[in-house]
Amino acid sequence: MQAQLRRPVLSLALALLTGSVLGAAEYSLGVQLSAGAPLSDLKDLVGNTGGADVKIFEWVNLGQGHVLRPQFDVLAFAGRPQSISTPVGTVTFQGQSKITVSMESVGADYIYFINGDANQPSPYVGGGVALSRNRIEADGPGAFGDAQETKAAFSLVVGYQFDRHWNVEVGFRTTKWGNRATALGQPVGLSYTLPTILVGGGFRF
């Protein structure tokens, strides 16, 4: 197992060191649409309501199954929670207030194709990092305001590519939101984790 994992890592490192990767890289653009299932604090914030993600990416095929995927994506949820937890206690909304959570991020994924060819049918695995602008907007009775903060985001993906153009993908993405806000009329430091399961498909031009 260790030998199987070591082989793609060593081949990518060797290509980068020799400078052969970028000169021979193959570039293309694509778009991916996904449905999002909120977890943890995010699930409570939006009342367990699903969200949607739109991703625009560049596909940088480095060869031998290695791909870099720089990308910009927008993930958004909107729901009417019954209640949420704060440092000063539970705020009860009873579905009267709407909370919108949006995450706009710029980052990149590294993807490895199991069969060693990023242009052929193959399963793939990967992970990435991004800089995410996370915003929570709340309106209605008991709402605690509107605030945004920029945080790091991390992701893991597993997918299958049917041909050079089409793929399906399941991913896990997480980031945080924390800001000075008002709850129950008092200034408090709110902090929430925003993990999401994403399931969708993409098209590469």
Image (cartoon, rainbow, N blue to C red):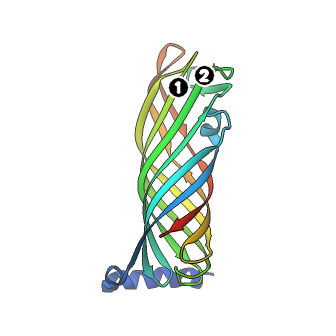
Q: Is residue 60 left or right of residue 20?
A: right
Front residue (pair 1, 51): 51
User: Of helix, strand and loop, which one carries label 2?
Assistant: loop
User: Which amino acid does the dot numbered 1 rest on?
Assistant: Ala
- Residue in view at x 48 percent, y 61 percent: 128
- Residue in view at x 33 percent, y 86 percent: 20
Q: Is residue 93 left or right of residue 118?
A: right
- Residue in view at x 46 percent, y 40 percent: 134
Identify the disc placed on residue 138.
1
Q: Is residue 94 above or below residue 35?
A: above
Front residue (pair 170, 167): 167
Residue 150 position in % (x across, y down): 40, 42
**Pointers 2 and 1 in contact (C-beta within 8 Å):** yes
Identify the disc placed on residue 38.
none
Q: Residues within 10 Å of mark 1 (few under 14, many from 20)?
A: many
Q: Residue furthest top?
A: 185
User: Which amino acid does the dot numbered 2 rest on?
Assistant: Ser
Identify the disc placed on residue 97.
2
Q: Residues within 10 Å of mark 2 (few under 14, many from 20)?
A: some
Residue 35 position in % (x across, y down): 62, 51
| Whole-number angstrom distance, CA of label 2 to CA of label 1 | 7 Å
User: Of helix, strand and loop, which one carries label 1?
Assistant: strand
Q: Quadrant of residue 161?
A: bottom right
Q: Earlier in the sequence, mark 2 or mark 1?
A: 2
Q: Quadrant of the N terminus?
A: bottom right
- Residue in view at x 50 percent, y 29 percent: 137
